[in-house]
Every structure is written in C-alpha cells, then in structure tokens.
Amino acid sequence: MDREELDSLFPALVSRGYDIVGPTVRDGAIVYDRLKSSQDLPCGWTDEQDGGKYRLIRRKDKALFGYVVGPHSWKKFLYPPIQRLWQAKREANGFRVLAQTPEPTKYAFLGVRSCELHAIEIQDKVFMQGPFVDPGYKARRENSFIIAVNCAQAGGTCFCVSMNTGPKANAGYDLALTEVLDGGKHYFLVEAGTEKGVEVLKEVPHRPASEAERRTADRIVSETARHMGRTMKTEGIKELLYTNLEHPRWDNVAKRCLTCANCTMVCPTCFCTTVEDVTDLTGDHAERWRKWDSCFTADFSYIHGGSVRASAKSRYRQWMTHKLASWIDQFGTSGCVGCGRCITWCPVGIDITEEVKAIRETKPARGDGQAQKGAK
Ligand code: SF4
Ligand code: SF4
C-alpha cells in the first residue's frame, strides 16, 4: 500500500471502535499518543540516541517511521501509571467496597516495534498468566489491535539482535508494516498476522507485493540487524550475575547512579507499583490507587523499620540482576528486550550493556565473587 492508502487504516479501525495510539512529536521527543490520522505521525523525523542523549533531527525524506523508540512504551496504555483499584463508602452499618470495573477502551497500537512486541508478551505473562490476573490489563490487552512496524534503522542504543527480539516482528501482531523508500518510491509492505488483521486489511486498498518488493523489505530489515548501536553477550548471563554479587563493578556504577528511577520508568517490561489510600475530609469516602513505583526508591524495599536496599549499589544490582538473571527463573525469559531506553534516558548515561561487559571481562578484586544468590 502507498502513503495515501495507509490513511484508510484509520477509518477502518475507528469504525470498529478503536482508539488509535501511535508515535507523534511532542516536546522534542517522539512519544505515543492518540492519533487522528497519519498526518499526526512524525513525518520526516529521526532520532539520535546514545547514553544519556536523545535528539530529534530532520531526515531528507518523508519517512513516517524513520526513527526508533522514544521514552514512552505501550505499558503506559495497557498498565497506566496511576489507577484507582477500589473505593469504599461509609454506610449506616459500616463500609461498602465498590470494585473498579475495567474501562472498555479498545486500543489500536500503530507503530509497535519488534522489541516492544516482546515486551508486551513479557507483561502478558506477568499480568495474565500467573496465579493473579490483573483484570484491567487483561481487558485492555484482549481488546487491543496491534500494527507492528519492522525497523528500517537501528538506534544508537538498540541491542534487540543480542536479545533475540528484533528487528523483524515475527509474532504478536495483527498487521505488520515495512516502510520502503526506494528510488523515489514510498510504500508499505503489509503482512496480516491474525484473522482480525485480515478483516481490517480488506478495507484498506492494497495489491499483492512483487517478489522484488519483498526482497527490498527483507534487505531493509537485515541491514538494520547489522547496524545495532549496542551488543550484549548473553551466554551464561544468569550464572555470571548470580556469581558476581560482590563484584567491584557494583561500587563503580553506584558512584555514577543517581537512583533517579528513570531507567525503570522508561523500561517497557518493568512493572513495580505501590498503593496509596486516600480519604475525603469527612471520612465517608476512601479510595485505593495503584501507582508505578521503582526498585530505585528507598521506600520500595521498606519493611518493618528500614529499607532492605539502602544504597545505590544494592538498588542498581537488584535491578540489573532481576532484569537479566532472576527474571529468567521467575518468568522463563530475560526481562530485557534490548530496546535501549534505559541507556538513552539515564541522565548520567549508565549503560546496561557496558555493565555486563565490565563484569564479564574483569575479575572480582577480592576473589569473593561466589557470593550467595539473594545477598543484599
Ligand atoms: S541507572 Fe541511571 S536512570 Fe537508572 S536510577 Fe541510576 S542514574 Fe537513574
Ligand atoms: S532493561 Fe533497558 S534495554 Fe532492557 S528492556 Fe528495559 S529499558 Fe530496554
């Protein structure tokens, strides 16, 4: 389909009751927000990313998806940063608790990258496949429609190839697009991944792709795979981290880490929350709210009189060891999809790939790197 035909996706989705959310430019970054038409997409923009650095710059062409991922992820919509869980109202004989019914929003996510599809899959496991199912997440997820975009360029902090999560979307989408800008031509190859996708595609003008067009799309994605900004050697990573809980590198990273929690806020798989109870002045009405929290705050590990992780060293170690090691024991996969956001949005440019490399390549100073799993 061509650039104009892509516009027909919008009415096809709106007529099915979807709220379309996708990338758009705001405040000097590409963020995810509601879109009215393809005019809202970041046409002709790209992003430059490195440790602690993010900058939008103009491209020479009119690409709609010529950038990588920004500070937002889809968890903002599937698992909102703040949510009321229940309310309680005082009545003559006590309190009545009113459950929160999940709102019936139907989201169509446009422009989901392969690493993000993997992040959604990880959050599906956390919120829908364990003993405790989150009803709000489940309702939003089951109602969602996903239009993936295969990455046509790699960002400076991307390492999806190392994590085996990209750059081509292989599953988890209803439709997948590859944007092609080739010799003055601008078109999209589209693949349907579900029956829902096939139904929507019927309402969008398109034609079968030629063999040459398919080859061009494949070449674009393979080129992207060859130009990752970062790499991470993942072989034996769980054992590496479990046996290096006292590695001197944790002191080194602690000197730089501000415990600002940015890395956890931008990470598409992090899911820690806290709850806050509020009452009105009369005491007749109370509410419990859930808010995103972070393992980088002192309060997060506060138990009966003190914080278990009082130092920056223990918090960074806990975060990275959970992401790359204990997550595997807990959920069967790594908690990192290699999107690079935690590197780009860390104000001091701490780089998870460099930290792993440093631990892998340097021996512990005291020879006590066999510290027990679970040490604080
Ligand atoms: S690693 Fe960076 S982003 Fe994460 S808490 Fe430390 S300073 Fe903040
Ligand atoms: S740990 Fe960093 S690179 Fe990995 S998924 Fe989270 S934000 Fe992305």
Image: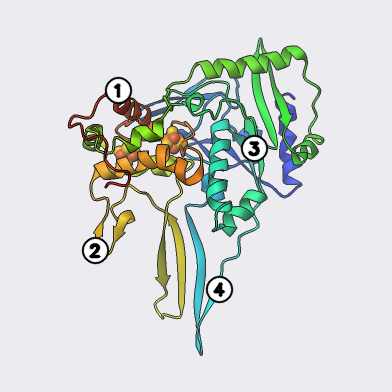
Q: Which colour scheme appears in the figure?
A: rainbow
The residue pinned by badge 1 equals 361
Which numbered dot is residue 172?
3
Residue 77 visible here:
no
Q: How far apart are marks 3 and 4 (CA)?
A: 35 Å
Upstream in the sequence, badge 1 or badge 4?
A: 4
Q: Dot 3, crowdedness within 10 Å: few (<14), some or many (≥20)?
A: some
The residue pinned by badge 2 equals 305
The foreground one among 37 and 374 is 374
Give the number of the mark in front: 1 or 3.
1
Image coords of residue 177 (percent x, y): 67, 28
Judged from the image, the quadrant occupied by ligand 1 is top left
Upstream in the sequence, badge 1 or badge 3?
A: 3
Which numbered dot is residue 98?
4
Image coords of residue 239 (percent x, y): 37, 34
Give the number of the mark in front: 1 or 2.
1
Upstream in the sequence, badge 1 or badge 2?
A: 2
Residue that appears at 24% across and 37% down: 246
